[in-house]
Image: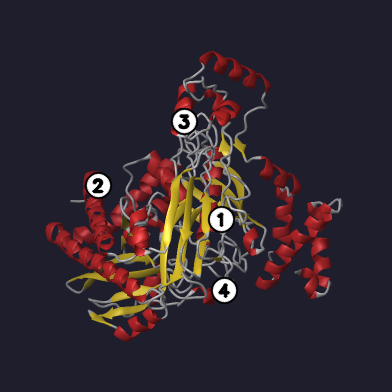
Amino acid sequence: MMDDKIGLEILGNRFQAIVDEMAQALFRTAHTVFIKETQDYGAVLVSPKGEVFAASRRYGVLMMVGMPMDDAIRAMREDIREGDIFMTNDPEATGGMCTHLNDVYLWKPIFHEGRLLCFAWTFVHMSDVGGRVSGSIAPSSTELMQEGIRIPPQKLFREGVLDEMFLKTFLVNTRTGDQNWGDMKACIAALSTAERRVGDLIGRFGVETVSNGIDKVLDYAETQARRVIATVPEGTYRFSDFIEADMVGQGMLRVNLALTVKGGEFHMDFSGTAPQVRAALNLPSFSKDGHWMLITGVVNWLCTREPSIAYNAGLVRPMKVHIPKGTLINPEAGAAYGARYSTSHKVCDVIIGALAKAVPDQLPATDSGQGSILLVALPDMETGATKVSVIQPIVGGSGGRPVDDGVDGTMVILNFLKNVPTELLEREMPEILIRHYGLREDSGGAGRYRGGTGSIIEFQTFAPYTTITSRNMERYIFPPAGRQGGTPGTTGYTLLNPGSKGEKDIGKIDILEMDVGDILRIGTQGGGGYGDPLSRPAQAVIEDVLDGYVSPRTAEALYGVVAAADGSLDAAATEALRAGKRASRDPLKEFDFGPVRDAYHARWPDAMHDAISEATQDLPRLQRQMYYRALYDRIDRMIDAGESVIAADVPALLAALRSAPRRAAG
C-alpha cells in the first residue's frame, strides 16, 4: 500500500507530524529560557538500527537527521522494556551522539504487542550540568572532567518507575537542578506524545505498514539525495579555513578538506586538520559517516535544491567521512568538548567552500561563522544560590546568496536559535539591564547581493560577582569571505565599559568577571557579499543607507553610489563614479578572504601547514599536540628574525625540538 511515491509521501508526512507535535509539547512545557525561548532542543523518531527516520523542520534544532544513535542503542540493547526511558549526555559512551555534556538526551522505546517498533528521542541543552564554571562551558577547559557531570546511557525510568536516586544524584551535581528537572519533564511529555501518536498511526495503517515504512522512507530520502548529488561535476575540490584559538593560546587551527564527488556520493577527507587541543574546541565525531555536526551545510544545500525532499537520515547516507584519529574533529578520549560548535561551524564553512568550487552559482558567501551563546551567572543575594541564564544567542549575519541578500542578524545554518525577549530576560534576571540590541551598520560585505548585517548587544550588570561566558566566539581575526566579486564581511568585537575612560577591547570571552555597574558591548560579524558590488541596483543601495544597513561613506567607497543632499539617488554622480571604479579596479575574486588572511597565507602557505601535520601525525597524542604548537611558534620566530624557512625544513626542525630539553618545546 505504501510502496509507491504517493504512499511514501503520505507516510513520511505522518511521521513528520508526530515529531512536530513532540517538539511543540516539549517547547510549551519547558522551564528554562534556553529551551522555551532560544529553542535549543530536539525531537526525532529513530529506527531500531539507530537512524533518524523523522525530524522536525519547524521547531527546535533543525539539523538532527545525521545524529548517530546506534551506539547509544547498542549500549542498552540487552535490557529494553516497555515503559523504560533512557538518559545520557556522554559523548564517548554514545560514539558522538552527544557532542558535549550540556546536551542531555532522553529516549523511549515504542512497542506494539511486545514488538519493538522504534524509539522516540529528545534532547535539551541544559544551562548547567556542573563543572568548573557556571554554565559548564569555557573554551579554556582542558579535559572532559572539568565540564560537568557525565552520565553514560542508563535508565531514568524502569518499566514506568522513576529511578529517584539516580535523578537526585544527577540534579545535585548541577547548579540549576529544579530547572533541569523541569526541562526533563518536558522531554518526557514529548516522548509520551510520540508513543501515543505512533499508536494512532498503527491503528490507521496497521503495524506492518508502519514498521516496513520506516526503512522505506529512509531509502526514499537516500534516493532523492543521490539524485541531487549526481548533478555536481565529479572531481576533487579542496578548501581550508582556520579556527581562531588565540584566546586559549593555540593560535590558528586549520580545518582541511578534500571533497571528492563521485558516483552520487560525497567523500570528505579531513586529513591535514589540526590535532586535538587542550581546550574545549574538540568535536567528537568518531569519523562517522554523515555525522550531524559535520554535514549541516550540505543538508541545507540538498533541501534548497529539492525543497520537498524527505527529511530523514537517508539524506546523509551518501556522505562518507574520513577523519584521522586524534585530530580536532576526531579526538581521542578525555578531550574537552564544550565549545565544539566553533569547530563544527568551521567544518561546515570548508564543506560549503569546497562545494562552491564545483557549483559556484548554488552556494552563498561565507556567513558570520559565530554561533555563540552569551550566558550570565550571578548570585541570588537572598538565598545564596547561583542563577544561570542565557542572555542572547550572539550570531552574526548570513552570507550574500546567489539570488538574494544575506539574512540580517542571523545565519541560515543557525536559524533555529531564537532571540530571547528583553522583557523576559530582565524579569527573570532583574540584575541585568539590556541597554541596546539591534543591527550593526556597515557589517555585511558588499556585493550584488549584500551580506547580512551583524548585530550589537550592550548590557549592564548591577550584581556583584557576575560571571559572563560566551563560547564559540569566532572571526575576530579573519573576516567572513566574499564570493564571486563580493567583499568580506566585518570581524567581531567586544568592548568592556565602552565610551568610558576605562574602555577595553577584550576580544573573545572565555570567563569574564564583571563588577557592579560594568557595561559590555558585543558587535557580531556581517556575512560576506556575493557578486560584483558595482552591479547592485543603485536604488537598492540607497534604501540600505536609509535603513541604516550601509553608511553613505560605504555606499560610495564600495558600491559607487552617491546620495544627494536629501538622501535620494544622485544618478549622474553614481554613473560617473561607478565607471571610474570599473576601469581602475583589480579583477574580481572567486573568494575574497580580506587582506589579513591574505597576509597570513603569504606567511603560512598550505605547503607549510601540510608539512607540520604530516611531521607530527604519528606522534603520541600529547606529544603531537605539544610539538604541533611548538613548530608553529618556532617558525614564527624564525620568520620574525628574517630567516628563510620552507616546508622541507619542517622534519629537521621537529627533530631539533624533540632533542632539546622538554621545556624548550612548549
Query: What x and y, as percent, mark residue 157?
Result: 28, 79
For the residues labelled 3 and 1, say whether their Cβ atoms are less than 8 Å apart.
no
Which amino acid, mark 4? Glu
Question: Farthest residue in the top direction?
Answer: 572
Q: Position of residue 539 (x, y in %)?
A: 46, 22
* Residue depth check, mark 3 versus mark 2: number of the one nearer the observer: 3
The residues bearing labels 1 and 4 have C-alpha atoms spaced at a distance of: 33 Å
Please state which of the two labelled residues, at mark 1 or mark 2, is closer to the viewer.
1
What is the spatial separation of the Cα atoms under label 4 and label 3, in whole angstroms? Answer: 46 Å
- Residue at 82 percent across and 62 percent down: it is 653
Q: Nearer the viewer, mark 4 or mark 3?
A: 3
Residue of label 2 = 9
Q: Answer with the quarter of the image where residue 28 lies.
A: bottom left
* Chain-order first, disc 3 or disc 1: 1
Gap between marks 3 and 1 measured at Cα: 30 Å
Q: Amino acid at mark 2?
A: Glu
Q: Which residue is mark 4?
A: 143
Residue position for label 1: 497
> Is label 3 or label 1 in front?
1
Residue closest to the eye, 570 or 110: 570
Q: Amino acid at mark 3?
A: Asp
Q: Is residue 590 above or below residue 536?
A: below
Q: Which residue has dot 3 on it? A: 544
Q: Secondary structure at mark 1?
A: loop
The disc labelled 1 sits on which kind of residue?
A: Asn
Residue at the far bottom in the pictured view: 165
